[in-house]
Amino acid sequence: MPNQKKYTGLLVLLLVVVILTALVNISLGSVNIPLMDIFSAFFKEEVSSDSWRYIILEYRLPKVFTAILTGSGLAVSGLLMQTLFRNPLAGPYVLGLSSGASLGVALILMGASLFGGTMAGLLFSKWSLVIASSIGSLLVLLAVLLASSKLRDTMAILIIGLMFASLTAAIVSVLAYFSPAAQLQQYVFWSFGSLGNLSWEEVLILSIFWFIGILLAVTCIKNLNTLLLGEQYAKSLGVSISRNRMVIIIATSLLAGSITAFAGPIAFVGLAVPHLIRQVIPVNDHRILLPAVIMGGAILMLVCDIAAQLPGSQYTLPINAITSLIGAPVVIWLLIRKRKFLF
Amino acid sequence: METLIASNISIEIGEGELVALVGINGVGKSTLLRSLSGVQELLKGDIRIKGKPLRSLSSEKLSELISIVLTEQPISKNLSVFELIALGRQPYTNWIGTLTSKDLKYIQNALKLVDIENLQHKKCYELSDGQLQKVLIARAIAQDTPLVILDEPTTHLDIYHQAYILKLLKKLTVQTKKSILFATHEINLALQLCDRIILMEQNKVSIGTPKQLIEEDVFSKMFPSDLIFFDKISQSFKIKT
């Protein structure tokens, strides 16, 4: 299609912006490190300060990778859901994945006090939150998949996802109501989301899930384009609706589920980035949209993380709040400026 | 509660024929068309295309035999006309949908046959209902199937564009030798243009050329007789005065 040539330049530009924001992200923080020293740290030469090398390699670099993986992964799952449901309000969490994860984490953090000391030991394990939220997302995913195999109507799956979300949110509220303040605070902090706590080992695991999820999304590109005509046309063009739906749900779950497990429920990026990209690149061809959304998500997350660091200060703001604070005005401004909602 | 809609339907459509499917609301026209096109599971019976039973065909294979034109689908209006028509080539393209020069030829040909070459770079949200209908027909033509099925292609159109679309369908059957089957409520227009007409009623289905059906006087019993009647001389429905 002629689109591909027309937009190749733009995609390359986006990639350059990703790299630039990543470099700026590494350079800024509680201590600011000059760009030259970042390059030195990468290429094993002399760095002005030994602690800088440590900060870059052990802290900021894994955080940059986490930002790129979470931003792009959430944006892709948002795009997949928006196209699958042909609904601009859909995001990575419409299937109730984050609610499942929240429930898992809430049970570990706040349930311990309710159900006695049996789970208290788990609290100290570094992996306990990751495992709890993975199991939570997985259970919701299985429920949604079971429902989707029984249902022919895609819209019904959307409603069922919302119902699961309400159910789990209700259980979390009950847990929170009976929890002591300290545990409640721990849970609230988890729900703020965080990019900075991941070791290289965890980044590796996250990137494996990311890679599989993106790969599945890429295999769906043709069917996603066909779905732009609606399910009935897609079916008449030879798309197996239920199989395609299954693959898309699994890809979304791998991406959003693993990201929630490692970085908490970062909601906004997945919903906003596909809209941002569609406003900038007025095209619905997923061969362009998918790579553009991957890079758009990474850029937004990197920029938000820079802002969240409050460069030069000791404080870090919750990433979940920053993504909305920066992203929402941009989406609003773009929509008002164009006066046309492209979907 | 189960409702018996039309039963014992036995129809054959020949190559290059323009066939209209008429009947009162709720008689099962859309159900029949959806069953024929494979969008809906067959309730009962057997459908054969070029001798092959429909049930035995995969949806991929079927997409090379039947194309459809439906109204009121959640089509992304952000697609350009060219892109939308290009999606008709999906059954033939590779895993990521790359268009070959052969695909481009089919798309250009479809644009030309439906006479919308000047629209090809427009976005779908810029089109009128009539233009969009032509684009959807061009998409079906680009899919290059021996049978094209349309569900009420003339709804929402003014009488000029209704006639235009039906004329276009007639022209397409002649030029491409495709068979076209469409459901419609515009019986007056269908009588003037179609090769054959299928009239679906609760308990029977009549099929024949417009002339045959008028001679059999099937239309006068089609609707309740309190408001309209079928005028054999002008071959159209008239309001009772």
Image (cartoon, rainbow, N blue to C red):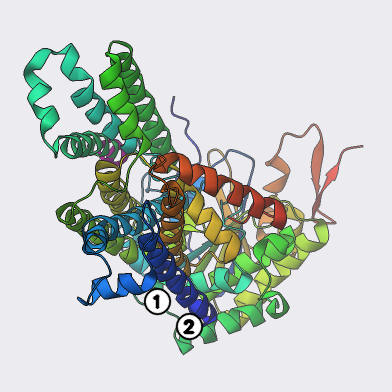
Point out the stretch of residues depicted in magenta: A145-150
Q: Position of residue A187 (x, y in %)?
A: 29, 27
Q: Residue furthest right?
A: B241
Tag 1 secondary structure: helix
Q: Residue furthest bottom?
A: B101
Q: Is residue A148 magenta?
A: yes
Kind of residue at disc 1: Tyr
Kind of residue at disc 2: Asp
Q: For marks 1 and 2, give the CA distance.
A: 8 Å
Mark drawn on residue B92? 1
> Which residue is located at x 38 percent, y 63 percent?
A27
> Which residue is located at x 26 percent, y 50 percent?
A254
Q: Is residue B165 magenta?
A: no
> Which residue is located at x 27 percent, y 64 percent?
A215
Which quadrant of the view contains residue A221?
A: bottom left
Which quadrant of the view contains residue B120?
A: bottom right
Vertical position of residue B7 compared to residue A340: above or below: above
* Sooner in the amino-acid sequence: mark 1 or mark 2: 1
Say few, some or many: other residues with alpha carbon within 10 Å of mark 2 (under 14 / 14 to 19 / 20 or more). some
